[in-house]
Amino acid sequence: PPRQQLLLQQLPGYYEVSVNDCYKTIVFFPVTGNKLDSEAKKWRLVADVLNDIAIFMEILAPNFPMCFTLIVCSAGIFKSIVGVAGGATRAALTVHQARRDNMADISAKDGSQETLVNLVGLLVSLILIPLVTDNPLLTFVLFFLFTILHLFANYKAVRSVVMETLNEARLAIVLHQYLRDGRVLGPLEANHKEPVFLEFRRTVPIKLGVRLGELVYT
């Protein structure tokens, strides 16, 4: 049948997706690994955005048969980045929430909540699937509606996190405020002013633990 022939034609693309997943997972982590801990809130939001983009590309792919493999491979690359960034930032936020050194308890509760949310999502999908079948317009309308709700909820969640340690952004905010009026901001104020969206502007490189000899020669 034509559908089976199409799947057989696109089968090499799925192998390419697996290769891209492995490649991006290996390459992405060494490049941004040192930022996933200190910039956990930013990368958590980036992971959510990339995940929604990947889902949108997968929904869009069947409408472009000629570019199906390229679109699916690109979505796979995004999802591989989401897997690395999402897992790393989850660990960083779990450490932050474990105020009593109870990481196991926090992880168990997080897993229980995730299971409950997945169950609710499964039940909702059983209701929506008959409605969106053969109805592309309704599919995209519901997707954008749920995506907006998802990103807004994650933005508010990231904004509510109050880190008690200093990263580059929070340190710059605290120093700027102190040099301006001599006031030292508390963790709540510093976190409130911290940007949660990823910035691509160049920053001054900061290296810790540099040898004295390297400073002398440079």
Image: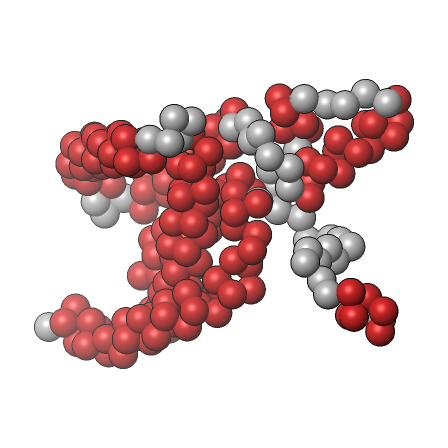
Where residue 161 sits in the image (x, y, percent)?
Answer: 51, 28
In the rendered view, would you say 65 is above or below 198?
A: below
The answer to whether any part of residue 194 appears in the image is yes
- Front residue of 1/196: it is 196
Q: Residue at x 86, y 22 (%)?
A: 182
Position of 32 with respect to 106 (left or right) is right
Position of 107 with respect to 73 (left or right) is left
Where residue 79 sits in the image (x, y, percent)?
Answer: 38, 57
Colour mapping: secondary structure
Where residue 171 sits in the image (x, y, percent)?
Answer: 72, 37
Q: Residue furthest right?
A: 180
Q: Residue furthest left?
A: 1
In the rendered view, would you say 5 is above or below 183?
A: below
Q: Residue at x 52, y 50 (%)?
A: 36
Residue 167 lies in quadrant: top right
- Front residue of 75/33: it is 33
Residue 98 lies in quadrant: top left
What is the count of numbered marks? 0
Q: Quadrant of the N terminus?
A: bottom left
- Front residue of 198/131: it is 198
Where residue 21 sits in the image (x, y, percent)?
Answer: 37, 67
- Front residue of 52/105: it is 105
Q: Residue at x 62, y 21 (%)?
A: 188
Q: Quadrant of the C terminus?
A: bottom right
The answer to whether any part of residue 141 appears in the image is no
Q: Residue at x 64, y 37 (%)?
A: 166
Residue 169 lies in quadrant: top right
